[in-house]
Image (cartoon, rainbow, N blue to C red):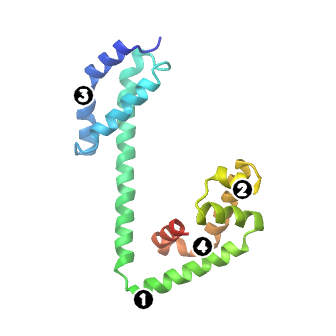
Amino acid sequence: MALDSVQYKSVFDLHYEALYGYACSMLKAETYVDDILQNIFIKLWQSKEKIKPETVKSYLYTSVRNECLNHIKHKGVQATYAQTTMMAGSTSDHNNQTEQKELHEKIQYLVNQLPEKCAAVFYLCRQSGFSYKEVAEALDISVKTVENQMSKALKFLRSGLSEYLVSWLPLFILHLINL
């Protein structure tokens, strides 16, 4: 038996306040709690055909826990990135320019080593900003082939740049964005 709109409203009224408190206790702040709960209740509504009324409470609490943990993890990643960016920014401009130039040259060298079809897909996706579908149409290949070629290209680049990734990860990410 699926949740109907009356049951959904009653579930919302019955559990929202307790879920709000639970999420606040996990996040230690109220800033993102409304958004998290809104997403969870939207997912509940979208899954109303699959969820049995007797499992709704455990579904909601499990969802809140998972969303809060994902949020905390995401904030940790953001903090690490910000710290890495600040550390990278604190080195002298000359060193940064030299490192960026060296990284750019290495990337260009590796891209030039890609097989022709793989390089064409890579350039169209990354440099021209085409979607996989647009690249597939332009090269008269399937979207799956575009995905496979991009996967090959990125794997090759990661492999070739592995020595740089630890110390230059923030620069590498910025470079790929600007390719």
Residue 6 vertical position relative to residue 165 in the rendered view, above or below = above
Residue that badge 1 annotates? 94
Residue that badge 4 annotates? 161
- Looking at the image, residue 117 sits to the left or right of residue 178; the answer is right
Identity of the amino acid at label 1?
His
- Disc 2 and disc 1: Cα gap in Å? 41 Å
Please provide percent x and percent y for residue 47. 47, 24
Residue 78 quadrant:
bottom left
- Looking at the image, residue 44 sits to the left or right of residue 10; the answer is right
Element on which disc 2 rests: helix
Please provide percent x and percent y for residue 141. 76, 52
Residue that badge 3 annotates? 18
> In which quadrant of the rendered image does the C terminus lie?
bottom right
Circle 4 packing at 10 Å, graded few (<14), some (14-19), many (20+), is: some
Residue 88 quadrant:
bottom left
In terms of depth relative to the viewer, which is nearer, 72 or 37? 37
2 or 3: mark nearer the eye: 2
Residue that badge 2 annotates? 138
Choose the circle earlier in sequence order: 2 or 1: 1
Residue at 34%, 61% in the rendered image: 79
**Discs 2, 1 touching: Cβ within 8 Å:** no
Please provide percent x and percent y for residue 152. 70, 60
**Discs 2, 3 touching: Cβ within 8 Å:** no
Identity of the amino acid at label 2?
Ala
Choose the circle earlier in sequence order: 4 or 2: 2
2 or 1: mark nearer the eye: 2
- Disc 2 and disc 3: Cα gap in Å? 54 Å
Is residue 155 shown to the viewer in this render?
no
Identity of the amino acid at label 3?
Ala
4 or 2: mark nearer the eye: 2
